[in-house]
Amino acid sequence: MAANRVYEAWKGSNKFLFGGRLIFGPDAKSLLISLVLVIVPVIIFCVFVARHLRHEFSSYNAGYAILVVAVLFNIYVLILLFFTSARDPGIIPRNLHPPEEEFRYDSSVSIDIGGRQTPSLQFPRTKEVMVNGLPVRVKYCDTCMLYRPPRCSHCSICNNCVQRFDHHCPWVGQCIGLRNYRYFFMFVSSATLLCIYVFSISAFYIKVLMDHNHGTVWKAMKESPASVILMAYCFVALWFVGGLTGFHLYLIGTNQTTYENFRYRADSRVNVYNRGCINNFLEVFCTKVQPSKNNFRAFVQEEVQRPPPQVVTQEPESDTGGDHRSKVEDDLDIGEDLLKISQRRNIEGFDEEIRSRGSNGPYHNTSEGDSVLGSDRRAPTVRSDERHSSRRRSESWEIAPDVLANSNVTETRSYVSSRH
């Protein structure tokens, strides 16, 4: 059986052409509408307007330049549209498994609860990274099983995490992100200039008809209805593409994305990415486009099944040596119990509460444990120290100080747990 290529086993909603060489969004059919809106007006302009202006200048053939400019400008706009919609916008490859380096073994408890052990692994939903010397919180994506880099967001239409996600544009049928934002802006701004060009030449042709026939503007408009239609069309289109051009000029000057501007405009937060107007423009237009992180034509590698994380337990020992510590994973089902235990000061009370809940105590709802853990800035780590004596054995619980030294994960409000 032949191995599948990456684009054939792609889990996103994208559509591929030419063996994975071109990638589009799931709404790529809307691209046809954009092609019609760009090509048809230019064809009408060339046939009914520019063709009649070939010999209207002092240089007999100078009017051909109007026709040539319109055709070349239209081709240039179409190329930019192709670069925007048919390339990887900056998709981050999905992980096959959650990031193991982020797993937190928050407790070491070796206790049978109701005759069984129920350990679990957990890792924070958010963590902080430093950007330009300021902390930025990044979130965990359940679909892609990764921590999204700064300015990355998951597109619900394409079902991918996209670097420097700006928005999903239905007119080009593609996400606008790190690798195609430059071409998107150039497409929109060039379409604006094309509209201005067609509008101006059409108005000039109306003026030429007025001069030739010594008539009024109404007579000239009746003689060339195509010019009137083109002027009306370009006037309406200018409100759309011209408005987008102005808006994105503002976004580039302040180093924002459309997503950030609409989502965080009311937060009055500091823009850590703003490097000054000139540097912001240089970042968009004068930096090298990063290569794609995906090789869609590569063959899919078979996933190697990894053994589940082992739970280490330590049996009671008969010797009376020094202190021994055993590591066992905590369970969110007893999160509330562990939190209460960590706050108690009476060591003897700990033994009674654990034994009583282990023998006949019901399990608590996981939502309660999550809410208690989520109310803290960091999930506490509980450590069990076994102390041996000649007659009995007691356990003491304390918050491990090494949690406070962990600066990679902050502002953790909820947790993802993997149950075994």
Image (tube, helix red, strand yellow):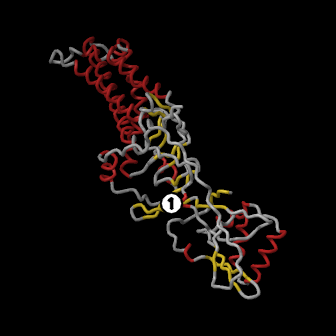
Q: Residue at x 15, y 18 (%)?
A: 58
SS class, disc 1:
strand
Q: Residue at x 62, y 71 (%)?
A: 380
Location of residue 124 in the rendering, given as x and y in whole percent from the top left corner = 58, 61
Residue 212, picture quadrant: top left
Above or below, comparing residue 419 to residue 171 in the picture: below
Identify which amino acid the numbered label 1 is placed on.
Arg
Mark 1, residue position: 137
Most foreground residue, 271 or 2: 2
Left or right, 229 with respect to 29, comes to left
Residue at the outermost left position: 59
Q: Quadrant of the C terminus?
A: bottom right
Label 1 environment density (alpha carbons within 10 Å; few <14, some 14–19, many ≥20) = some
Above or below, comparing residue 187 to residue 39 in the picture: below
Left or right, 111 with respect to 153, comes to right
Residue 67, picture quadrant: top left
Most foreground residue, 2 or 6: 2
Q: Quadrant of the N terminus?
A: top right
Above or below, comparing residue 267 to residue 329 in the picture: above
Residue 382, picture quadrant: bottom right
Q: Can see residue 239?
A: no
Location of residue 204 in the rendering, given as x and y in whole percent from the top left corner = 28, 22
Q: Residue at x 42, y 30 (%)?
A: 237
- How many marks the image carries: the answer is 1
Left or right, 338 with respect to 77, comes to right
Location of residue 178 in the rendering, given as x and y in whole percent from the top left corner = 41, 45
Q: Residue at x 52, y 70 (%)?
A: 406
Location of residue 72 in the rendering, given as x and y in whole percent from the top left corner = 28, 25
Q: Can see residue 364?
A: yes
Residue at the outermost front position: 319
Left or right, 341 with respect to 72, comes to right
